[in-house]
């Protein structure tokens, strides 16, 4: 292993402060923890040697665990009921204990009227407030859990461009709150990719498939937009030309409505794209047992989508690019080799 990989592997994970859940008067189990066998990711030899840095919210150890597979312990889903909780400036407060649900930069400077709420459940997450992909995977599924135990609340924030239309297709009715006093509030531990999470993914996927009519395309390349962290595919034209020659439809979510995106991606057997939130469009629309193939910048290696493909019984593949001025490149010959490897796996 090269020295840089060793350095990344030794990076520690910061500890956490006292959690709001510790102050709950009642908690109950929605799904027990579960062990499940995770398949290894599909990738080319020496791809790991190309990695120079991981995404800031993960570690190399976590990424290696994801792509190598094995028996994975998935955390339980637990609900906690608290009393006398305040919602202020993007956070939940009970006494001196705080749980942030927005970044400081996203908090409105205008003071909204204080609401008095009798009984509610939190239907949003911290990461879902600024990553569209996490909103799709974490917040939407959490909303379904919150609906079953109380009045779902979402901390007021700027909405994503495709958010209203997705909520319409998924049958999600958001209730945005900026400042409130809650007599009773339910919060959740819901990060485990357990069977209850899969049940909610499948419900959302079913609603999407029933809400949009169309066949879609068997193979889809989803373009990454201009927003988000820098991970520019500098030879995107060459990559798209290769994929188009192999029957891929090129989908550009930044210039399409949700209905148009779903019409293009619905039932896809293979979805390809640069790592990022835009790939969630494919995750919810692609076929059962389909494959998600992620083009990885070597300086921002991140395989969090494998958590979801594993949960849904899908396959996960990736290819690591090479750093170049302004971003990274994916060599067409290497991508073609990986496509061939996916075809072989498909025929097995």
Image: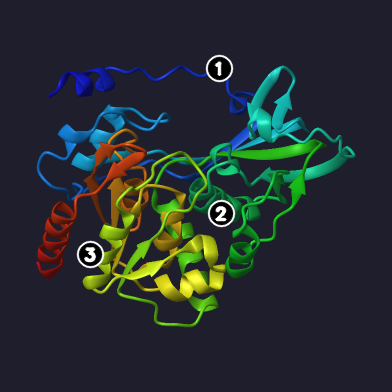
Q: Mark 1 — residue?
A: 17
Residue 112 position in % (x across, y down): 87, 39
On screen, residue 300 versus residue 199, left or right, reads left
Q: Residue furthest front?
A: 325
Q: Residue at x 27, y 17 (%)?
A: 10
Looking at the rendered structure, the secondary structure element under dot 3 is helix
On screen, residue 163 versus residue 51, left or right, reads right
In the rendered image, the vertical position of residue 13 relative to residue 37, given as above or below? above
Residue 347 is drawn in which quadrant?
A: bottom left
In the rendered image, the vertical position of residue 148 relative to residue 34, given as above or below? below
- Distance from disc 3 to disc 1, alpha carbons, whole Å, reads 49 Å
Looking at the rendered structure, the secondary structure element under dot 1 is loop
Label whose residue precedes the other's in the sequence (2 or 1):
1
On screen, residue 185 versus residue 4, left or right, reads right
Q: Of tags 2 and 3, which is closer to the observer?
A: 3
Residue 80 is drawn in which quadrant?
A: top right
Q: Quadrant of the N terminus?
A: top left
In the rendered image, the vertical position of residue 28 relative to residue 150, given as above or below? above
Residue 107 position in % (x across, y down): 72, 34
Mark 3 closeness class: few <14, some 14–19, many ≥20 residues within 10 Å: some
- Distance from disc 2 to disc 3, alpha carbons, whole Å, reads 35 Å
Residue 304 position in % (x across, y down): 36, 43
Q: Residue at x 65, y 61 (%)?
A: 164
Residue 124 position in % (x across, y down): 62, 44
Q: Which mark is residue 242?
A: 3
Q: Which mark is residue 140?
A: 2
């Amino acid at each position: 292993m090269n020295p840089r990989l060793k350095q990344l592997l030794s990076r520690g994970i910061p500890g956490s402060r006292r959690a709001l859940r510790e102050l709950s008067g009642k908690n109950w189990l929605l799904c027990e923890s579960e062990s499940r066998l995770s398949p290894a990711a599909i990738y080319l030899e020496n791809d790991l040697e190309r990695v120079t840095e991981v995404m800031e919210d993960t570690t190399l150890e976590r990424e290696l665990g994801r792509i190598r597979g094995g028996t994975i312990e998935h955390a339980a889903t637990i609900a906690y009921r608290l009393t006398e909780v305040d919602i202020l400036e993007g956070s939940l407060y009970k006494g001196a204990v705080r749980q942030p649900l927005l970044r400081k930069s996203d908090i409105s400077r205008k003071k909204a009227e204080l609401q008095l709420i009798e009984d509610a459940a939190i239907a949003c997450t911290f990461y879902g407030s600024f990553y569209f992909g996490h909103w799709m995977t974490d917040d939407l599924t959490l909303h379904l859990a919150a609906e079953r135990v109380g009045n779902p609340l979402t901390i007021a924030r700027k909405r994503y461009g495709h958010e209203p239309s997705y909520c319409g297709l998924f049958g999600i009715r958001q209730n945005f709150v900026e400042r409130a006093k809650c007599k009773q509030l339910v919060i959740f531990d819901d990060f485990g990719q357990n069977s209850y999470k899969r049940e909610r993914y499948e419900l959302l996927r079913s609603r999407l498939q029933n809400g949009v009519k169309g066949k879609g395309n068997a193979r889809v390349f989803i373009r990454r937009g201009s927003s988000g962290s820098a991970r520019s595919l500098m030879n995107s034209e060459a990559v798209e030309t290769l994929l188009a020659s192999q029957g891929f439809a090129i989908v550009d979510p930044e210039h399409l409505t949700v209905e148009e995106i779903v019409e293009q991606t619905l039932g896809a057997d293979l979805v390809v794209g640069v790592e990022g939130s835009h790939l969630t469009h494919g995750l919810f629309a692609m076929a059962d047992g389909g494959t998600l193939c992620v083009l990885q910048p070597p300086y921002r290696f991140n395989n969090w989508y494998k958590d979801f493909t594993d949960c849904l019984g899908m396959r996960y593949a990736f290819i690591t690019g090479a750093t170049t001025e302004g971003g990274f490149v994916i060599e067409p010959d290497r991508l073609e080799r990986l496509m061939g490897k996916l075809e072989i796996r498909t025929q097995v």
